[in-house]
Amino acid sequence: MKIRTIITATFVAFSMAVPVSAHDGEAETVAMNFEAAIPNIPGKSLIAVEVDYAPGAASPSHTHAKSSFIYAYVISGAIESKVNDGETRIYRAGESWSEPPNALHSISRNASKTEPAKLLAVFVLDTNEKALTTPVK
């Protein structure tokens, strides 16, 4: 299977697997930013997605692809986040965090009820992973 097909399937699964909530029917949107197989690491790919949070938008608790290491960078606004047993923290534009494989991302939301926020999430993962994100019930 070609990497583009895998990435497209992953993006579709990510988009469909992450329900959101916000005021006035607004929500988060996820857009593919970059995707490529890593040429010197067979079986690994790099995927970057932009996540735009409307004011008050939040993602449900979720995990990511089991093999994925994630780097998250806040482009604008402020994102409240909690990963595993770490502290709940608000990250502002220019700040970042990482998530190890098999992490539980229990809080991921726009810290503002009035201003939008945007983050870039960069995944390094096994090329054959199908879903980037899976909600936790």
Image (cartoon, rainbow, N blue to C red):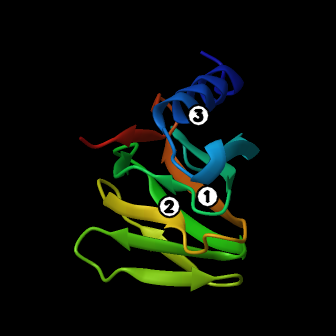
Q: Residue furthest front?
A: 24
* Cα–Cα span, label 2 and label 3: 17 Å
Three-letter amino acid code at disc 2?
Ile
Mark 1 neighbour class, 10 Å CA radius: few under 14, some 14 to 19, many 20 or more: many
Vertically, is 31 above or below 78?
A: above
CA distance for labels 1 and 2 = 5 Å
Q: Is residue 37 rendered to the left or right of residue 85? A: right
Q: Would you say 41 lies left or right of 69 here? A: right
Whole-angstrom CA distance, mark 3 to mark 1, is: 15 Å
Q: Residue 15 carries which label?
A: 3
**Dots 1 and 2: beta carbons under 8 Å?**
yes
What amino acid is labelled 3 in the image? Ser
Q: N-terminal of the two: label 3 or label 1? A: 3
Which numbered mark, 3 or 1, is in the foreground of this view?
A: 3
Q: Can residue 28 be seen in this view?
A: no
Q: Dot 3 lies on which element?
A: helix
Residue 81 figure quarter: bottom left
Along the line of sight, which residue is nearer the eye, 67 or 98? 98
Q: Position of residue 24 (x, y in %)?
A: 64, 48
Under circle 2, the secondary element is: strand
- Identify the residue position indicated by label 2 in the image: 70
| On screen, residue 61 above or below 118 | above
**Viewer-proximal residue among 32 and 19:** 19
Amino acid type at circle 1 is: Val
**Residue located farthest toward the top when viewing the structure as drawn:** 1
